[in-house]
Image (tube, rainbow, N blue to C red):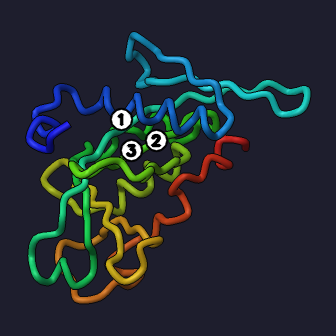
Amino acid sequence: MEKNNRQKAGHYEILGETLAKFELFEAGWNPYSRYLDVDKVDLIVRKRIEEEIIYKEIQVKYGKLYDCGPKWERELFDVTSWRFFKENEFSDFSHRTDFFFMYVLAHDDGYEKDSFIFPAKDFHDLIQSAIPSKDKRKVYISRSIKNKQKWYLRAQSRFDEITPDTCIDVSRYRRNFDLLNT
């Protein structure tokens, strides 16, 4: 499909959920869609581990990856995704060990399996660390230009280097389907 047609795609969350189903299936889970998005559950996944059957609930978020623009940003990152979340949007889920967020990121040039699995508490905590913007948080997830395996959540708006004060390393969540086994 031509890039300009992909940019006109309808509801991006549906694309994210479809990609998430493929990713989860390839990781050994059986995904089931929830058609009523009450309780913020998009997918229920099932897996047998020996004699035990486990279920997890997943909220899927889709983020479009953009090429970085400003010079300061291009010196640190090559692509980035951003979106706003209410500060306490997921606080009701932060105590649940069976609830996860799957953040699927894709560039207009194609999906490169950039999906992240976050336990609910971790995702809530990351949102709290994101950049404040009125009553919301602006969540930037960006890939390092020097090491394509490193992904960061930005904790500040503008900076000259990646440090624990400016960014939080979220690389361990990328395609970490093992987190669902816990």
3 and 1 marks in contact (CB < 8 Å): yes
Task: Assess disc 1: are there few (<14), some (14-19) or many (≥20) residues with their C-alpha within 10 Å of its C-alpha.
Answer: many
**Residue pictured at 51% horizontal, 57% vertical:** 174
Rendered-image quadrant of the N terminus: top left
**Type of residue at label 1?**
Gly
Relative vertical location of residue 167 with respect to residue 110 in this rendering, above or below: below
Disc 1 to disc 2, C-alpha distance: 9 Å
Q: Is residue 35 shown left or right of residue 54?
A: left
Relative vertical location of residue 122 with respect to residue 9 in this rendering, above or below: below
Relative vertical location of residue 39 with respect to residue 72 in this rendering, above or below: above
> Label 3, on which residue?
104
Q: Nearer the viewer, residue 34 or 157?
A: 34
3 and 2 marks in contact (CB < 8 Å): yes
> Label 1, on which residue?
16
**Residue pictured at 62% horizontal, 46% vertical:** 177
Q: Kindly state the secondary structure of the residue where label 1 is placed.
A: helix
**Type of residue at label 3?**
Val
Furthest residue in direction bottom, as rendered:
160
Task: Assess disc 2: are there few (<14), some (14-19) or many (≥20) residues with their C-alpha within 10 Å of its C-alpha.
Answer: many
Q: Kindly state the secondary structure of the residue where label 2 is placed.
A: strand
> Label 2, on which residue?
102
1 and 2 marks in contact (CB < 8 Å): no
Q: Quadrant of residue 140?
A: bottom left
Disc 3 to disc 1, C-alpha distance: 6 Å
Furthest residue in direction top, as rendered:
36
Label 1 or label 2, whichever comes before in sequence order: 1
Q: Kindly state the secondary structure of the residue where label 3 is placed.
A: strand
> In front: mark 1 or mark 2?
1
Residue 62 at what x, y percent from top left?
Answer: 32, 40
Residue 14 at what x, y percent from top left?
Answer: 31, 26
Residue 167 at what x, y percent from top left?
Answer: 36, 74
Task: Assess disc 3: are there few (<14), some (14-19) or many (≥20) residues with their C-alpha within 10 Å of its C-alpha.
Answer: many
